[in-house]
Amino acid sequence: MSTTAAKGLEGVVAAETEMSFIDGTNGVLEYVGIAIDDLARQSSFEETVFLLWNRRLPTQPELDAFTKELRGKYAIPNELVEVLKHMPKSAQPMHALRTLVSALGAFDEDPNTVEPEAYRHKALNILAKAPTLVAYFARQRQGKDFVAPDESLSFAANFLYMLNGEKPTETMERAFDVCMILHADHGLNASTFTSRVIQSTLSDVYSAMSGAIGALRGPLHGGANEGVMRMLNEIGSLDKVDVYVQGKIDRKEKIMGFGHRVYKAYDPRATYLKTLAKRLAEDTGNQALYEMSHRIEVLMEEAVAAKGIYPNVDFYSATTYHAIGLELDLFTPMFALSRIAGWAGHCLEQLDGNRLIRPKAEYVGPHDVPYTPVTER
Ligand code: SDX
């Protein structure tokens, strides 16, 4: 029965934002009016977070103060370390992250405030601690000791240091920093919309972030980067790409890392990540995966580009994260580490002139149905 419902809310404008501008027809992404390519080339994740939350770039003293506050929050409380120690090694990292971010709220003596300044400090606290939670969880399941955060390091360098037990090269630090910039915000994607719905009830930052992590995990959303890596592993080698892709197309099965609800052109983030993936592949001798990815892209361009299906942010982020040395099931948590910035920014926007988000559902079921006692059913 046809309804007036916009399936998947496609095309529905559900909020205004001053953070990301997306032109899906021409493949344009801007953060507060600045082209994503300029930010990827010249900015840092810390500066990008300040830009998104304050709607302007910081002066140097402002950036220094913001960076100092962020780094001062890297460490996690001992009680939370104890909770983390009881996480099963077999837990999936996104489930662990969702649980531990939620647990952070249990240790906050005033978790529910929606006063903007207090909210912002709590959001920064979650942003700063999420990398520590992921790194500690990843090392624990490998039977390795925790590596405490180093406040002298940038967000990107500190995460790789805590994860690997050694400071990253400048190339790896910059590559990861760029990935964080590129993933920080993207309009009303499913996980951001989730965070705004939760926030619109005047619930708390921990609930909004935890709910958003849950939405991001889905394979149609942030989970796609892990799906791309699994696909590359399944294909195995460059000579098997053509048969694999043709089979997927023939069976009308979707290829992870392609297609987008808004972009009907090349995702500008994918453009940048492709360049990064190629450079890292050459630096680390991982050319095979990059060449397979490029071949998949060529085949998909021939088959479905006419339908507006192009690589999205997840397609080349997979080979980039692999080249940085990350385990496959840490790829989506990387997306979350960055997108906490966008989710919190949108929740602050939601709180500014908040109205409960409550769309309608069109009832398409029967009417005037008599109640039949259970003895007669
Ligand atoms: C992210 O929204 C955001 O901004 C998200 C994100 C962000 O920064 O937050 O950009 C991050 O989530 C990127 C998307 C990651 N997901 C994937 O890579 C999963 C694979 N992609 C598809 O599942 C799909 O493209 C979606 C979910 C991303 C978008 O789906 P839509 O808009 O609901 O489109 P659809 O499923 O209705 O498909 C429309 C047509 C269909 O063909 P027809 O039935 O009309 O003939 O396009 C085809 C689909 O079969 N299609 C694909 C395809 N994606 C869509 N065909 C082959 N391979 C694909 N990947």
Image (spheres, grey):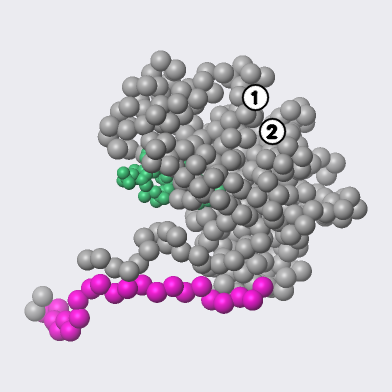
Residue marked by disc 1: 280
Q: Earlier in the sequence, mark 1 or mark 2?
A: 2
Mark 2, ligand 1, within 8 Å: the answer is no
Labels 1 & 2 near each other (Cβ < 8 A): yes
Numbered badge on residue 175 = 2
Identify the secondary structure beneath mark 1: helix
**Considering the image in quadrants, where does the C terminus appear?**
bottom left
Residue at horizontal 43 percent and vertical 31 percent from the top: 301
Residue 217 rendering spot, x and y as whole percentages: 50, 49
The residue at 76%/69% (across/down) is 117
Identity of the residue drawn at 45% across and 26% down: 298
Work out whether 124 lies above or below 113: above
Residue 116 included in the magenta stretch of the image: no
Question: Is residue 87 placed above or below 163 in the rendered structure?
Answer: below
Q: Report helix, strand or loop for mark 2.
A: helix
Magenta extent? 352-375
Residue at 62%, 29% (x, y): give it: 275
Write down which quadrant ligand 1 falls in: top left
Q: Give the x, y percent position of residue 30.
A: 65, 50
Tell me the distance, in whole angstroms, between the alpha carbons under discs 1 and 2. Answer: 8 Å
Can residue 96 be seen here? The reply is no
Residue type for callout 1: Leu
368 drawn magenta: yes
Does 328 appear above or below 191?
Answer: above
